[in-house]
Amino acid sequence: MKIDGLERRSFILGMVTAFSECVAGGCKRMALSPPMSEADFPDTVREACLIVKEHGLEYFLEQNEDLPQERRFSWIVIAAKPRTLEEYHYLRRQGLSPAVSLEPFYDLLSYNPDERVDAGFDAFGTFFPKE
């Protein structure tokens, strides 16, 4: 199934919103946006970064150069804390890449209740008791 530009933009923004809620809620320490092609990136990244900031999160724009030119893409690294981005950058400096394998990044992509961010709302709070 091929997705046209507008549908792809909506898909990316929807996924960034969902991943931001996951990170802000402590379900993950970090998330990676869906890959964005060169054509997707300029039109989508500004709005996607606003979504991340509205959730009180940190982000880093990664323009992947680990793959051959014809397979390159960009993504947004979404994190609750600056130290998580520092850990991500450390792994990248070691030559590791999520585009090649996510395995070295599993700890950063995992659950950690200490990373929770209070953004002033909880999409699921009404469904679950406070305790």
Image (cartoon, rainbow, N blue to C red):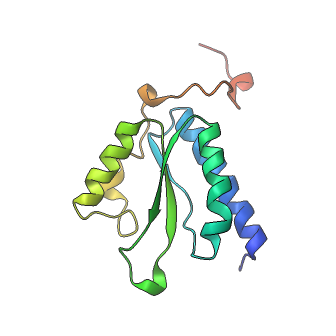
Image location (x, y in percent) of residue 47? 68, 54
Give residue 20's quadrant in the image.
top right
Residue at the top extreme of this rendering: 131
Q: What quarter of the picture does the C terminus occupy?
A: top right
Question: Going 42% across and 69% down the picture, which residue do you hit?
Answer: 64
Q: Residue at x 45, y 45 (%)?
A: 30
Quarter of the image for residue 37 reads bottom right
As drawn, 13 above or below 97: above
Q: Where is residue 60 in the image (x, y as percent from the top left)?
A: 46, 52
Quadrant of the rendered structure where residue 24 is? top right
Res 69 visible: yes
Residue 1: x and y, percent? 71, 79
**Residue 9: percent from left, percent from top:** 71, 65
Using residue 103 as the reference point, say whether residue 95 is left or right of it. left
Name the residue furthest bottom.
Answer: 70
Q: Which residue is drawn at 39% across and 84% down?
A: 68
**Between 70 and 63, which is closer to the camera in this rendering?**
63
At 47% from the left and 81% from the top, the residue drawn is 71
When the figure is inspected, residue 38 is found, relative to residue 84, above or below; the finding is: below
